[in-house]
């Protein structure tokens, strides 16, 4: 009998019910209160999950990667997953409380946890993961996370304490991630992109790592694919990009935002065409494949599931509104935004609505827009609108990137801006919406209303 | 006319979007037909100080500051000579700290600065992270207004102009006339800076922490060298300060230059909406 746990689950479930009746998401509060009653709730319930837990962390790509993993492993397991992206410990607790029986039993036999960078240590301590995937580490919301170096130091300390049976999966192309291999004594899997060149426009890279993290010499890059990710080696010490076990090559990015590649998961390259855009999604695909490999999934199953995957909430999400289309790409930090911009720059005559908010979940500091290479869209844009709480900051950024904006193109109201940008489209045109995190929620709400048949021309 | 710009340690001190300051200087020159030339100077490279009219020195990660601090000693003499000859320097956060006498970290390590500003910084446990609104030092305010308003418009004209275009926001003209006294940005630092006698603050803190969160000062001014904690980037949404720096930098090489008028409607809207955001609690 564990009355504390039962009470925590009961309260969590009741709260979920109440919040859902009030049409809330119930992704954080139930867990928060349940943890208040039983701080060991996640630890206890995690032990009930027969095949253990998988942790997915890193700056960019967590949500998409975790969902890819979910699609693959669901063919064999019953999976519990914080799908809504509530990725602090309370999010994990909320998900567990909702899935568990009143007596703390779970039907699910495998867990996938998307985990916030700053929560990684706490999550590892609580769920004792079987697999940890670390995708990349880049500057993101410096007001909230602090500098990249300090997060990496915290990661190092918690990886040192890791159980030897845990498989650690690391991005070979990110020198700040691959170096973490030396802190773990158990099994390792590296993944990476083998191409030296890719068919995306070049961008002025912002790199958080230019120096060898071991000896401080300037790193040599044979190729720099994205931010500080690429094929690097140190001219002074032995540090170099490890040869990845799981890799992609011969990448071709299509203007319909699909991707062709050869992917080698278990020593046998398979040709694949899947419906996700950009280099950043290649990394997500490789990361998910590596996790599946560590669970002994067969390459053919993995590839089939990648082919049929349609993206996660707000990350390359398509919505049809009458005879017009909207395509949403979440942007939240310079590295991620730069990858999105170079991906959409494959096309021309773009209709763009960019939305900048500065709430806590967006990062209150908007200076990252100056580290973002908007210049790459010059001559590619047909219509441009700007919205959000910091619309003026973004408009000024775009002015200095060479775009002409009139005051009519700028409006803080997201709903208004969506309607007026849709109005500017010709039939069958697509509006590309680039929202920050909290703006994405507003975008979803307002598009949902429009798609349900309210005539936006008349509103 | 050509403006020679030196970007100090852009590979190591580029963490907080401060690059926008360089973009702003370059664009505002370009729009006026003034040529610019941006040169990056980093660790191990020599600095030809007579060449540059304007220096920019941004913020970086903590460990970068150790590397840069060491290298900067070798460039100290040249930088002093440049500043004494009237060159312009804008330094933000980490760059500002390294131009002071020293920075003592929380752990007690001392990073030697070059003492261009008579000031020092002590690491603290609380990070000062928020929008920062500053009222520019009164004397500097007069100088900035002389440059900006003489080339742009009189205050009354300014209000009228923005009144015509900002029908949505009736407070904009007021914010703008008020704005000419302010600088607005975003601070993110744990070091507390204390000024000595030989240096003046850039301004007085209205909202935020500024130098140390105690004495209401923000930034430092010595000759045409400016230090501050304002990210954002600073210059794009403070066009009066951007033009002031440009005009000071040109003055050294070409004598007093009257800057061509630019349409700064967007910049002022950004400025006043950032001030509004600073005052709001959301």
Image (cartoon, rainbow, N blue to C red):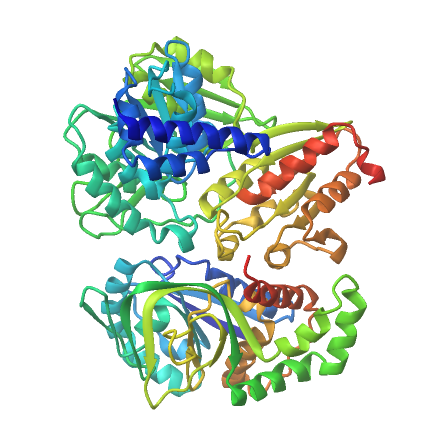
User: Toward the viewer: B197 or B241?
Assistant: B197
Res. A127 image quadrant: top left
Quarter of the image with the N terminus of chain B is: bottom right
Residue A426 picture location, percent across and down: 79, 34
In the rendered image, which quarter contains the C terminus of chain B?
Answer: bottom right
Q: Tell me if residue A190 can be seen.
A: no
Specify whether B11 is left or right of B145: left
State the count of labels.
Answer: 0
Relative image position of residue A197 (x, y in whole percent): 42, 34
Determine the image quadrant of residue B229: bottom left
Is residue A218 at all visible to an observer of this figure?
yes
Q: Percent position (x, y) of residue A103?
A: 34, 19
Instruction: Looking at the picture, tell me which residue is in the foreground, B198 or A458.
Output: A458
User: Residue at the spot x=75%, y=70% of the render?
Assistant: B162
Residue appearing at x 57%, y 49% in the figure? A374
Q: Is residue A211 left or right of residue A425?
A: left
């Amino acid at each position: 009998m564990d009355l504390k746990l039962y009470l925590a689950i009961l309260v969590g479930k009741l709260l979920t019910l109440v919040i859902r009746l009030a049409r809330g998401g119930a992704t954080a509060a139930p867990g928060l209160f349940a943890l208040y009653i039983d701080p060991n709730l996640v630890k206890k319930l995690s032990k009930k999950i027969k095949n253990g837990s998988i942790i997915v962390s890193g700056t960019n790509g967590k949500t998409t990667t975790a969902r890819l993993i979910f699609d693959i492993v669901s063919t064999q397991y019953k999976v519990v997953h914080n799908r809504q992206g509530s990725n602090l410990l309370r999010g994990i607790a909320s998900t567990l409380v909702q899935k568990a029986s009143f007596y703390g039993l779970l039907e699910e036999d495998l867990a996938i946890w998307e985990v916030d960078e700053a929560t990684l240590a706490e999550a590892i301590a609580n769920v004792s993961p079987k697999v940890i995937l670390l995708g990349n580490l880049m500057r993101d919301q410096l007001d909230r996370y602090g500098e990249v170096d300090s997060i990496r130091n915290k990661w190092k300390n918690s990886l040192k304490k890791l159980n030897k049976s845990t498989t650690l999966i690391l991005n070979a192309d990110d020198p700040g991630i691959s170096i973490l291999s030396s802190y773990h004594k158990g099994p390792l899997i590296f993944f990476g992109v083998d191409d030296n060149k890719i068919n995306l426009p070049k961008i002025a890279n912002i790199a958080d790592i230019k120096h060898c993290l071991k000896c401080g010499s300037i790193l040599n890059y044979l190729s720099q694919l994205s931010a500080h990710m690429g094929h690097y080696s140190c001219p002074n010490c032995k540090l170099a990009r490890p040869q990845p076990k799981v890799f992609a090559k011969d990448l071709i990015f299509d203007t319909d935002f699909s991707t062709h590649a050869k992917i080698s998961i278990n020593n046998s390259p398979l040709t694949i065409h899947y419906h996700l855009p950009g280099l950043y999604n290649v990394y997500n695909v490789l990361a998910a494949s590596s996790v599946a490999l560590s669970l002994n999934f067969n390459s053919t199953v993995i590839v089939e599931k990648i082919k049929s995957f349609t993206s996660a909430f707000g990350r390359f999400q398509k919505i049809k509104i009458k005879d017009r289309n909207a395509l949403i790409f979440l942007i939240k930090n310079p590295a991620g935004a730069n990858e999105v911009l170079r991906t959409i720059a494959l096309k021309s005559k773009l209709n763009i609505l960019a939305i900048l908010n500065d709430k806590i979940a967006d990062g209150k500091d908007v200076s990252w827009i100056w580290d973002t290479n908007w210049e790459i869209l010059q001559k590619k844009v047909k219509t441009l609108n700007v919205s959000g709480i910091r619309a003026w900051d973004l408009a000024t950024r775009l002015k200095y990137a060479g775009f002409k904006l009139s005051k009519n193109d700028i409006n803080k109201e997201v709903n208004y801006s969506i309607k007026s940008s849709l109005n500017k489209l010709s039939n069958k045109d697509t509006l590309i919406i680039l929202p920050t995190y909290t703006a994405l929620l507003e975008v979803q709400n307002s598009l949902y209303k429009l798609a349900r048949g309210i005539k936006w021309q008349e509103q | 006319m050509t403006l020679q710009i030196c970007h100090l340690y852009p590979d190591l001190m580029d963490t907080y979007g401060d690059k926008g300051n360089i973009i702003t200087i370059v664009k505002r020159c370009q729009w006026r037909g003034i040529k610019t030339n941006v040169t990056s100077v980093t660790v191990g490279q020599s600095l030809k100080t007579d060449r540059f009219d304007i220096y920019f020195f941004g913020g970086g990660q903590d460990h970068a500051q150790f590397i840069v601090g060491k290298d900067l000693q070798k460039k100290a003499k040249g930088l002093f000579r440049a500043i004494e000859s009237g060159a312009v320097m804008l330094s933000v956060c980490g760059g500002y700290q390294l131009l002071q006498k020293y920075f003592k970290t929380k752990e007690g390590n001392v990073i030697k600065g070059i003492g261009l500003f008579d000031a020092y910084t002590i690491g603290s446990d609380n990070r000062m992270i928020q929008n920062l609104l500053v009222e520019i030092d009164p004397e500097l305010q007069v100088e900035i207004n002389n440059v900006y308003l003489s080339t742009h418009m009189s205050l009354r004209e300014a209000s009228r102009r923005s009144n015509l275009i900002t029908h949505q926001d009736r407070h904009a003209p007021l914010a703008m006339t008020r704005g000419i006294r302010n600088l607005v940005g975003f601070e993110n630092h744990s070091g507390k800076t204390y000024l000595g006698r030989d240096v003046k603050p850039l301004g007085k803190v209205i909202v935020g922490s500024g130098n140390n969160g105690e004495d209401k000062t923000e930034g430092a001014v010595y000759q045409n060298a400016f230090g501050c904690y304002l990210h954002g980037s600073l210059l794009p949404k403070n066009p009066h300060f951007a033009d002031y720096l440009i005009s000071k930098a040109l003055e050294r090489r070409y004598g007093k230059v009257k800057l061509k008028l630019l349409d700064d409607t967007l910049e002022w809207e950004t400025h006043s909406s950032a001030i509004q955001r600073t005052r709001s609690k959301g």
